[in-house]
Image: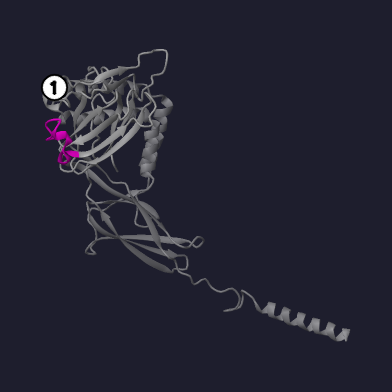
Amino acid sequence: MKKNISHLKLSLLGVIIMLVSCVSDDLADVGDLQDITGPTPFYNFSEITFAEFDCEENELSANYQFNFQAGSNLAVNGTQYLWNVTDSNGNSVNGLLLINKDLPILEALIDAQLANIRVIEDDIAELEFKIPCEDDPARLVVLQAELANLQQVLIDAQNALSDEVLQNVANLEAQITDLPPATLEDQELIFEFPGPGTYNVGLTVTDNLNKSNYTERTITVNQAVPTIPVPEIAEASFEDNSLFDGTGDGRDSWRVPSNSAWSPLGGGTTVIQINTDSNPDEAPNLPDGRQAAKFPAGGDRVAYQEIEVTPGAEYVLTYFSAFELDAENGQMKVSILTPNTSNFAEAQLEENIIASRVDTNAGRVVNVFKQHSLTFAAGENESVIIFANNSGDEARLDAFNIVVRQ
């Protein structure tokens, strides 16, 4: 019996050896299966459009650029890429520019070498943009003086560049000169479209077995729009000498057009007071600087400032408040009013209030500032009024700030 089992084992082993010997890469249609999987193309893109506008929001120039990067499901097989761009009617696009993907990288490296220079140049560009739009003669004089000073600062900074930095910049500029032109066969490149519109961007991917597939997407290039400017709040932290020309007592920008019209009590001065933390040996107990607006408990003082806004834009106004806690039920109200609001009574009407916030002294700590925010939409208005008044307890405001809501 044992001998029969041994013979059976040997027979099975012989069969296995024969089967294995038949699996050979040298025999046609025998052995490993041929890879018949074709490529599945895909691509990603990101917009890098930039544009320049004048103070009337007229477009001076625009580069409608998008960075495209191709890919496929094939991680091992060699691939070839071929881009195709047509307009919405399927026609070729006249004026389409191809840009080497490495160009913005090298330009960014140059900017890094010249970081201080670029900061000064940006400040100069900002002033050169503002000056033609400024219609206040006093402010114009200040801006022109700042521009002349910055231009000299730029010359000094350029003259102070080290030989090492200059050589690094020269090397990077040489690399830019040597960049090969971008082609439609690049895996990654930048398309600069001739203008806004709808484009069809297709990609063909071919593997090393000459199998290919095609994908196409519709890309919408939107008209460039001006960056919404951030409104200026003058004397936002109620500091002395913080106006554009180095003057001001911290209150000048917050005075109402008429005391009699805007007085909560029907008469008397409405000008805010100033609370000063003047101890030079200690850090100020204020959100910003050493001065804050003070509103006596009687509620006779108000803060008023009209600021320019962009119609259709949304904004977030932030500020800090504090209370003296000498009485209960103290309140501080900050409102955003329409520009046609002409007195205190109208400032209480819903049709004139774009947004408002009321904070009380309940649960507050004496003279400890707390930050608040107020979101509002400009609507059709080209300006709005920031208005603040209190009641019941002495209150303070400080560090107003405004940003465009993205």
User: In the image, 188: left or right of 378?
Assistant: right
Question: Which image quarter is the C terminus in?
Answer: top left
Q: How far from the left and from the top, in percent, is residue 157?
A: 34, 23
| Residue annotated with mark 1 | 267
User: Secondary structure under badge 1?
Assistant: loop
> 174 above or below 289?
below
Splitting the image into 4 quarters, where does residue 377 fall?
top left
- Magenta stretch holds residue 346: yes
Q: Is residue 112 above or below residue 193?
A: above
Toward the viewer: 3 or 99? 3
In front of the other: 213 or 239:
239
**Colouring mode (rainbow / by chain / secondary structure / one colour):** one colour
Can residue 86 be found in the magenta stretch? no
Q: What's the magenta region?
A: 339-353
Residue at the extreme front: 328
Rendered residue at 39%/40% (across/down): 106
At which x and y percent is residue 119?
33, 29
* Quadrant assignment for the N terminus: bottom right
Q: How many marks?
A: 1
Disc 1 residue type (three-letter): Gly
* Residue 100 x/y as whole percent: 36, 48
Q: Is residue 39 above or below residue 13?
A: above
In the rendered image, the vertical position of residue 313 relative to residue 252, given as above or below: below
Residue 391 found in image quarter: top left
Mark 1 surroundings: few (<14), some (14-19) or many (≥20) residues within 10 A: few
Q: Quadrant of residue 244?
A: top left
